[in-house]
């Protein structure tokens, strides 16, 4: 009876799979916008959290029903469930603060392998799914673009950098996540637009996608403009799909962004930040001069080599750390903070938000039992006096939240897809190096780069959704798709010199 019911649902889902995919892609920016307005009106964002959980559960159920290898879902459940039990035990040993919140944060990370498995099931269920996914990227991007335009027109843009009112973010709350999403989308959007017969389609897509990256104002978003445009030129040239008119469009888009770099929010914010750091460094130098000392990193290393040099050096710079790193000093003590910073007086080394948060979590992990180092720290422990010190780098975040074991498991998951790519190219580069593969490969690299430098993907369900789709497509292109001879990369033409015939008299 149960198998018959599953078969009925499988038939129903296969029939309506395209609609389900488009709804799923449309819901991602819509849920983000609902969260934005709830937060702006100072209301609880619990409704969107519940909606996300419901969407995740429905997607997982659909993937399970459509799959012909359902045992992999059980394998994933055993691994993820088993690890969380170990993580929870480590939390109990250290003293749990909020178990339910900890579970919610864990689900956000587990969403990545779960959704990846679901989209692989979708791609296996119907060979048209790959085309639907590509079109669904456009659908989601259209909603994002409409939000950005409306936020500017209605003067409700929250700005990428709220303190300096720079950057166009749209009705979204998390800057790095939104920059990551558009960065991942851009190569895929350009790939599909490049295939269109009419070049003006590529021109519109390039302007909209690269324009959003330009006005978002983050350095990684700005870099994604050139990775996407020149990456597509390289991929299409290698695959024998060169088109001079379309190349002109891609190059022109990138050059305009480069020519107006000094007018970009990214450049203006970088200059403002550099000036602020310069002023702070000046204050530190003044404080050192007033105490009759001027300590450079080289001098610090020399003094540390002397007997009791660390005590002498700490006395010289203690006022600087107490002034600029009062939070860390109050929480962990002056000596521990100064040693963690290696006695530096470089303002960028010990006052930068990202480095400070990594230091906080590192010193926190040192205080906790060894089980926390193995299986992670509860996120609510990463707070002090109402301020969160959860790190702003995703891979560091996975390590601190889920320990050595969790970090290895996650790296193994990502490495599996990277190995698939490398092995396929080694096995038959002409078969597997296609325009689609190049576009999704660029998107994957941009996703990993954003994850390493920001906290905008791996622990953000809105951005990790697109990462899961990209990983599933990588699997599809290598393990599922059947390639025709026409899709193979053409061999390079090599013209051999011909011998000249001797003239006969």
Image: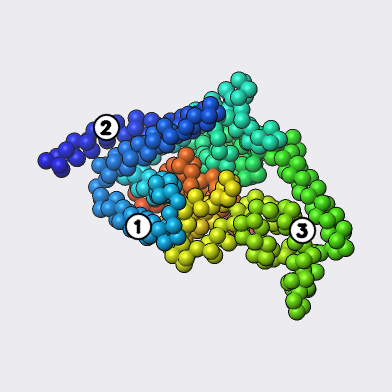
Q: What x and y, as percent, mark residue 404?
A: 47, 63
- Disc 2 designates what residue? 15
Query: Which residue is rendered at x = 50% and y = 58% of the image?
Result: 399
Q: Look at the image and tell me whether residue 427 can be seen.
A: no
Q: CA distance from mark 2 to mark 1?
A: 38 Å
Residue lying at the far top of the rendered structure = 154
Query: Which residue is rendered at x = 75% and y = 41% of the image?
Result: 272
Residue 131 in the figure: left or right of residue 261: left
Other residues around mark 2 within 10 Å, as few (<14) / some (14–19) / many (≥20): few
How many numbered discs, if any?
3
In terms of sequence position, does the residue under pointer 3 or pointer 2 come before the other? 2
Q: Nearer the viewer, residue 121 or 1?
A: 1
Q: Secondary structure at mark 3?
A: helix
Q: Nearer the viewer, residue 209 or 325?
A: 325
Position of residue 73 relative to residue 339, above or below, is: above
Q: What x and y, as percent, mark residue 482?
A: 35, 47
Residue 268 in the figure: left or right of residue 35: right
In terms of sequence position, does the residue under pointer 2 or pointer 1 come before the other? 2
Q: CA distance from mark 3 to mark 2?
A: 69 Å
- Disc 1 designates what residue? 85
Q: Secondary structure at mark 2?
A: helix
Position of residue 257 relative to residue 438, above or below, is: above
């Amino acid at each position: 009876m149960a198998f018959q019911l599953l078969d009925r649902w499988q038939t129903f889902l296969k029939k309506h799979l395209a609609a389900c995919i488009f709804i799923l892609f449309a819901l991602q920016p819509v849920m983000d916008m609902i969260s934005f307005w709830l937060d702006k009106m100072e209301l609880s964002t619990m409704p969107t959290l519940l909606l996300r959980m419901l969407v995740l559960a429905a997607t997982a159920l659909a993937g399970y029903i459509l799959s012909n290898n359902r045992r992999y879902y059980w394998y994933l459940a055993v691994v993820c469930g088993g690890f969380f039990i170990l993580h929870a035990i480590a939390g109990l040993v250290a003293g749990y603060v909020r178990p339910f919140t900890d579970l919610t944060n864990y689900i956000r990370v587990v969403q990545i392998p779960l959704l990846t498995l679901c989209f692989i099931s979708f791609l296996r269920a119907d060979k048209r799914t790959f085309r639907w996914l590509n079109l669904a990227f456009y659908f989601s991007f259209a909603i994002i673009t409409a939000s950005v335009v409306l936020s500017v027109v209605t003067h409700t843009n929250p700005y990428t950098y709220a303190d300096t009112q720079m950057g166009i973010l749209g009705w979204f709350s998390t800057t790095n996540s939104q920059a990551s999403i558009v960065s991942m989308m851009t190569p895929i959007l350009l790939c599909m637009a490049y295939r269109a017969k009419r070049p003006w389609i590529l021109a519109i897509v390039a302007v909209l996608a690269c324009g959003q990256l330009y006005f978002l104002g983050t350095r990684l978003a700005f870099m994604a403009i050139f990775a996407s445009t020149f990456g597509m030129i390289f991929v299409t040239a290698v695959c024998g799909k060169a088109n001079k008119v379309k190349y002109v469009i891609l190059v022109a888009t990138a050059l305009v962004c480069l020519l107006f770099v000094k007018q970009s929010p990214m450049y203006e914010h970088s200059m403002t930040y550099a000036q602020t750091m310069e002023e702070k460094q000046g204050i530190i130098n003044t404080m050192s001069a007033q105490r009759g000392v001027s300590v450079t990193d080289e001098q610090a290393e020399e003094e540390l080599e002397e007997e009791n040099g660390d005590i002498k050096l700490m006395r010289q710079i203690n006022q600087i750390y107490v002034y600029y790193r009062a939070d860390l000093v109050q929480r962990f003590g002056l000596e521990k903070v100064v040693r963690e910073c290696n006695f530096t007086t470089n303002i960028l080394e010990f006052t930068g938000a990202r480095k400070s948060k990594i230091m906080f979590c590192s010193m926190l992990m040192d205080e906790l039992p060894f089980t926390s180092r193995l299986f992670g720290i509860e996120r609510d422990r990463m707070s002090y006096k109402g301020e969160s010190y959860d790190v702003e780098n995703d891979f560091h975040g996975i390590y601190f939240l889920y320990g050595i074991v969790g970090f290895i498991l996650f790296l193994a998951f990502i490495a599996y897809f990277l190995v698939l790519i490398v092995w396929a190219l080694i096995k038959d580069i002409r078969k597997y190096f296609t325009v689609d593969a190049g576009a999704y490969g660029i998107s994957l690299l941009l996703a990993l780069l954003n994850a390493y430098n920001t906290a905008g993907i791996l622990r953000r369900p809105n951005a990790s959704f697109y990462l899961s789709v990209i990983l599933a497509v990588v699997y599809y292109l290598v393990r599922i798709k059947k390639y025709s001879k026409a899709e193979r990369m053409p061999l390079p033409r090599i013209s051999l010199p011909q011998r000249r015939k001797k003239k006969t008299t």
